[in-house]
């Protein structure tokens, strides 16, 4: 398979990922959650689908899930005790959620961690994936769609900061990625913004 030039550069220079901008750092006191417990560790896969014009695979979570129901996300979830690494957790969850066979996923590297308002510390794992038809798990995934990779570096349609909902006297800024049919915001948009900083270099 002939790789797109961006995928070739990422494969050749994976260390660029760790130098990406951290777009969603820890809130004050992030070493502990609001309830006094440590932040929970999670990992997500950022799957670059190797079409002639690459895309990023995203999911819409089902409305029945207990956390982040109905939101757009990258495949992934909590790092369990039996997961030896964030990479293992991200591959396991991607296989469970959308049927990406782990043996066909090429891991490239990690982006900086992001922290969610719900108490998760998330490690994003960038990967190259051949054009595989996803098989969404209906218990967890309502829809799978793909975002053109080129959109992340498009000034008109790339990630941007917008005013979020009012929270007491504050109105925090949140990351948003424009889309015709879905709202991509929060930690997922922050991860995409971090990755966009890498793409602008390569």
Image (cartoon, rainbow, N blue to C red):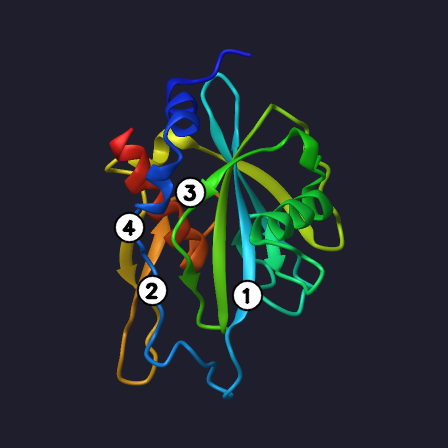
Which residue does the image show at 42% across and 57% down from the upper left?
113
| Distance between mark 4 and mark 2 Cα atoms | 10 Å
Q: Position of residue 100 (x, y in %)?
A: 68, 36
The first of marks 4 and 3 along the sequence is 4
Residue occupied by mark 4: 21
The first of marks 1 and 4 along the sequence is 4
Against 137, is 23 above or below?
below
The first of marks 3 and 2 along the sequence is 2
Disc sitting over residue 179 in the figure: 3
Q: Position of residue 3 (x, y in %)?
A: 47, 16
The first of marks 3 and 1 along the sequence is 1
Disc sitting over residue 25 in the figure: 2
Find numbered disc 3 in the image and state the secondary structure of the residue it sits on. Answer: loop
| Distance between mark 3 and mark 2 Cα atoms | 24 Å
Q: Residues within 10 Å of mark 1 (few under 14, many from 20)?
A: some
| Distance between mark 1 and mark 2 Cα atoms | 14 Å
| Distance between mark 3 and mark 1 Cα atoms | 28 Å
Which residue does the image show at 52% across and 20% down from the upper left?
51
Find numbered disc 1 in the image and state the secondary structure of the residue it sits on. Answer: strand
Q: Position of residue 197 (x, y in %)?
A: 28, 41
């Amino acid at each position: 398979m002939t790789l797109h030039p961006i995928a070739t550069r990422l494969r050749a220079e994976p260390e660029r990922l760790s130098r990406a901008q951290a777009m969603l750092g820890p809130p004050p006191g992030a070493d502990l959650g609001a309830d006094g417990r440590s932040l929970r560790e999670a990992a997500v896969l950022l799957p670059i689908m190797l079409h002639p014009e690459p895309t990023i695979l995203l999911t819409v979570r089902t409305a029945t899930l207990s956390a982040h129901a109905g939101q757009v996300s990258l495949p992934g979830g909590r790092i369990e005790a039996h997961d030896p690494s964030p990479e293992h957790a991200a591959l396991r969850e991607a296989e469970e959620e959308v049927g990406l066979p782990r043996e066909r996923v090429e891991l490239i590297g990690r982006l900086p961690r992001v922290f969610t308002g719900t108490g998760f510390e998330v490690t994003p794992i960038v990967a190259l994936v051949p054009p595989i038809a996803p098989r969404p798990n209906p218990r967890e995934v309502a829809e799978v769609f793909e975002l053109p990779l080129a959109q992340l570096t498009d000034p008109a349609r790339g990630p941007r900061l917008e005013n979020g909902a009012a929270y007491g006297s504050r109105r925090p800024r949140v990351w948003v990625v424009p889309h015709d049919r879905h709202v991509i915001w929060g930690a997922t948009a922050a991860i995409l913004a971090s990755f966009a900083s890498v793409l602008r270099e390569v």
